[in-house]
Every structure is written in structure tokens, then in C-alpha cells.
Amino acid sequence: MTTQNAPREIVEDAAASAGDLAVQMIEVNKWYGDFHVLRDINLEVFRRERIVICGPSGSGKSTLIRCINRLEEHQSGRIIVDGVELTEDVKKIEEIRREVGMVFQHFNLFPHLTVLENCTLAPIWVKRMPKKEAEEIAMHFLEKVRIPEQAHKYPGQLSGGQQQRVAIARSLCMKPQIMLFDEPTSALDPEMIKEVLDVMVELAESGMTMLVVTHEMGFARQVADRVIFMDQGQIVEMNTPDEFFSNPKSERTKLFLSQILH
Amino acid sequence: MTTETRRIVFYRDEMLPPKPPPPATTGVIGWMRRNLFSDWWNTLLTFIGLYIIWLIVSWLVDFAILSAVFTGEDRNACLPKNGVEVGACWAFVNARFNQFMDGFYPTDQEWRYLLLYAVGIVLLVPLLIPKAPYKGLNALLLFGAYPLLAYLLLYGAPSLGLPVVETTQWGGLLLTLVIASVGIVISLPLGILFALGRRSELPVIRFLSIVFIEFWRGVPLITVLFMSSVMLPLFLPEDVTLDKVIRPLVGVALFAAAYMAEVVRGGLQAIPKGQYEAAQALGLTYWRMMGLIILPQALKLVIPGIVNTFIGLFKDTSLVSIIGLFDLLGIVQSALSDPKWSTPTTAATAYLFLALTYWLFCFGMSRYSIFMERYLHTGHKR
């Protein structure tokens, strides 16, 4: 019985050097007031790795990925992204944000700008790219997400699925090293989920490092290298998708899976 | 017993085409039927309303046009004729028109402010038309070069052959426009800064912004004007004299800035957190995030409030007549005491003229704000 409380680790023989790490979280803790949202998070994400994070609501999974680009501040422990440690230093934070793209549940497109302007804004103002070059890159990624014909429309004229694909293109225009997805399909009508997942699958196949918070278990099975299950601010289980779904180790994971896989 | 067939299965392969709405619910007839004559009570109210409108309009037309006196040298023109009172005494306004426009500005120098008005219109109109090109250059000229030109033309520069016209000689509509436009141009950017300051995460900046806003909002404008004209000189060293027009001008601008700050803050609060997060996630710095993402949306939302403040400021400029400046209201009122034009309808005419002039400017601003709201709304409804 004693072994059940102690976290068990299966160390794979991947001889990882620090240069292969995209994200490293060491003993990360975070509180909202008295509420302990992230508890002793240890996570290493390798380059080109695809990680799916799932868990019940309030388990801290969104908070975890939002710490990676400092939309949330962690209060203890270390987070190292692309070799740069996140501290109070605003310059470092901006440097990391240039390398880390993020896609939100509610798209968060800028409604006063056209689709094309949404995509070129950051390259022009953050990377100081000439407008013409930024537009070429934007059109390239809008073609990748299969909506180049919508470039001159405003976000409000698009469907939810189209908006989310624009949001993905907007992030990709910054040529990020890492992409974070925070429940990208949760706010979509059922008919539109597939078009967004298809784009994400293609992105995964292109070798992008991805951390995806989602409940789309089909997606997890198809593209994830590792699946992480979180509950009460802790990583409860981390496993390959095959093992995670067919042979979960933790009782909590089994319960969760039995609830969502009807 | 009746047999009832209940339909359980239903399907269609062809979708229904849209049909036109029933007649007499659309167009002018439909609108009138719904809003004016929907039942006997509404019909009665409609007729009573029409009667009241008729009473007002017919009186106004009679007073301002039909029985009005348009020409005349002095009060004799506007005295009751055969025991019947005449209408508006426009002859009085006509005789004093120059003074109403510029106060005591020397007559031979009038071209200076007329030229300034003309340049102002040439610069302002294209800036107000959204589709006109060269917005950046246009704004630079209007907000950079134009104030300098205004100073040179209005105040004068002896080295350029323009004799000095002291601000004490400025008055009438000219003074009203100077105070209002300077107030408008200063209060908007200042208001935006204080709104951002009040929402800042830096405690000192937030505290100072709150102090500024709450101080100016908590003091009546009249008090501000009196303090600026009576008390301020007492605190300044003997040899420092601040211009009599500059002092209330600064007061009006800061006063409006405090109100503007709260209007803008209202807009900032309406922007969802996701917009900030998306901008931050893309690596935008604070000022770029505010300037490119947050403020364009927030200001668009509060256009009615901003224009409301502008209109309030424009009308509040008339309070400077209390501290001895002869703005449009001040100069008209002082003209009323002239015995040469003392007739039963002089005052009514003068105030009608005042009301019309103020109304024209304020209504213009109001219409423009409605136009901008509609223009900015197209395309991205959400």
C-alpha cells in the first residue's frame, strides 16, 4: 500500500540533453489566493513532441500551459522555455512569447482588424517585418489552414471553426518553436470541430512542438506522443496514448476515462 | 370515436424558399399603422401630439420670420407698431454681428482669424472623412502645425508684420471656439492617459490618476474658473503673470480630461480579457497592445460618451463669461445692456440667436458621432 502514494516514474532511455528540451518545468507551484492550483509540477517537453493534457475542469491544466508563456505567473519552482528561464524580466518574457504561439478556447481574434491584419500585426510590430513580407507569410499560413479566400473579411463574418483556424494561422505567422492549445475545440459547434482538428493534425505531422489541452480523445490517440492526466493541480498520470487508454495505471485515471469514454 | 392520425415520421428533401412578409407590415404605411395608429388611444395621442407640434412651430415661424424685423438702425425699428409687438429683432443681431463673432478684435485684422478658420476647415474636413487619404500627414498638420499657425495669426508676430492682438481683445464666437477646440484637443489624449493610469498595475501611477480624476470631477467648473482667475495669481510670484485667457483654458481642459478619463475607462472595461491575453501571447509590448488592440476597440465603444463630453465642454465654455471674459454668451449679454437697442424683443432675439449658434455646433458633433459609429460598425458585428 505504501507504494501507491509515492509517484512512480518510468524513465525511458531517451538520452536527452538540455538542447533537446523545449519546455522544462521544475517543482512549479502556483496559488490563486489560498487555492493551490499547481502542485509540484515537473514536466519536460522535448522538441517536436506532442503532448495532450486532459483532466476534469479545475484540475489546473489550462493554468499549466498558461504559465509557459507567462499569462499566469508561477510562485515557486522554475520554468525554462527554449533555454530561457521565465522570471520577472519583461524582456525575457517578451522573448519567450515571440517563440511560443497560443490558441485560445474563444479564439480571441481582434474583431476590429481583418483576417489578414490579424495575421500580420505581430510580425510587423513585434518582429519589425516589412508589411509585404508579413502579408506573404500570412497568406501562406491562411492557405495552410484552408481559408485564404477569407483574408479580407472581419472575424465577425466567419464561423467559429473558421475563426479558430485563423487564430492558428495568426500564431504560426510568428514562426513559433512551440504551440500551446487551450481547449481549442471546446467552444465550437459539433459540425466545426473536425475542420480545426484536421489543421492541428497536419501541424503535428509537420513536427511542431505542441502542448494541447483538450478532451478530444480521438485526437490524443492519433497524434500525441504522451498524454498527461491532471487532477487537483497535480500530474496524476503521464503515459503513452496506447497505455493511457488501454491500460491506465492510476485509479483516478481509470475513473476519469470511464466517465468520458461512454 | 374519431380516428386520429398522428404523424410520427416526417422528412423533407427540398428546403423551403423564403417568402415575402404579409402586406401592410412593411414600408411607411406599415410603420405608421404599427407606431401611430395601432388602436384608438394611440391614434388620439398621435393627433394631440401633432396639434402641440403645430402650436410650437407656427409660433416660432411667426416670431422668427413672419413678424420679425430684419433691418434697422436702432431700437425704433423693433418697437411695437400700432400697438402690436413685432417678432424677433434681427436688426439688432445684424448690427452687432461683427462683435458677436470676434469680440474686440481690431476690424482691420479680421482677415487673420478668417484665414485661420479657412485653413482649419481645409485640414479638419478631410481628417473627418474616413476614406480621405494621407491621414497621418493630415493629422500632423492639424495637431502639429496648425496650433502654431493659430498662435501666430491670432496673437500676432510683429517680426512677420502681424501686430499683436492682446487676448483681452479676443471675444465672441472666436474665443468660444479657441477655448472649446483647445479643450477638446487636450482633453482626449490626457483623458486616455489617465484612464490607462487608473487601470495600471503600478500602484503609484494608479493612485495619482485616481487623485487627479476625483479632484477635477469633485469640483464644480465655476469654482475652477474662479480659482484660476482670482486665486491663482495670489499664489504666483509677483513678476509671473499668466494670461487671462490661458488660465481658464487650462482649467476647462483639465476638467474635461477627468470626465474623458472615466468615459474611456468605461470602454476599457468592456474589452474582454481574451483580447489582452491574445495580444500578450503574440509578444506585443504594453503600449503596442494598448495602441493597436485595446484602445481602437475601447474608443469605438465609447464614441457616444466621448462626443457627449465634447458637447458638454463646448457648452461649458460659456461659463467663462462669469469671470469677465467676453465669449459668445458674454458678448451677447453685454450687448443687451445697450440702451440704443432696448426693445421688448431684443433679449428674446439675442438668446434665440445664441441657442441656434450653440445648437448648430453641438448638433454637428452629434451627427458626426452617429456617422462614425455606423461607419466603424460595418463589417465586424459580433
Image (cartoon, rainbow, N blue to C red):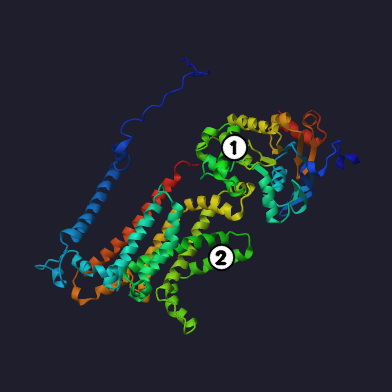
Which residue does the image show at 45% across and 73% down from the upper left?
Answer: B224
Q: Amino acid at mark 2?
A: Ile
Do the residues bearing badges 1 and 2 touch, measured as CB atoms within 8 Å? no
Q: Secondary structure at mark 2?
A: helix
Q: Residue furthest right?
A: A2
Of circles 1 and 2, the one toward us is 1
Label 2 CA crowd tier, 10 Å (few <14, some 14–19, many 20+): some
Which residue does the image show at 41% across and 60% down from the upper left?
Answer: B310
What chain does badge 2 belong to? B
Which residue does the image show at 20% across and 60% down from the upper left?
Answer: B64
Q: Is residue A82 left or right of residue A196?
A: right
Q: Residue furthest bottom?
A: B238
Q: Quadrant of residue B137?
A: bottom left
Residue B108 x, y percent position in the rendering: 27, 71
Q: Amino acid at mark 1?
A: Gln
Above-or-below relation of A159 to B307: above
Q: Secondary structure at mark 1?
A: helix
Q: Is residue B108 left or right of residue A126?
A: left
- What is the total number of numbered labels drawn onto the structure image? 2
Residue B317 x, y percent position in the rendering: 38, 67
Tell me if I can see residue B377 in this picture. yes
Q: Is residue A49 left or right of residue B302?
A: right
Tell me if I can see residue B38 in this picture. no
Q: Which residue is mark 2?
A: B210
Q: Which residue is mark 1?
A: A164
What chain does badge 1 belong to? A
Label 1 CA crowd tier, 10 Å (few <14, some 14–19, many 20+): many
Above-or-below relation of A23 to B3: below
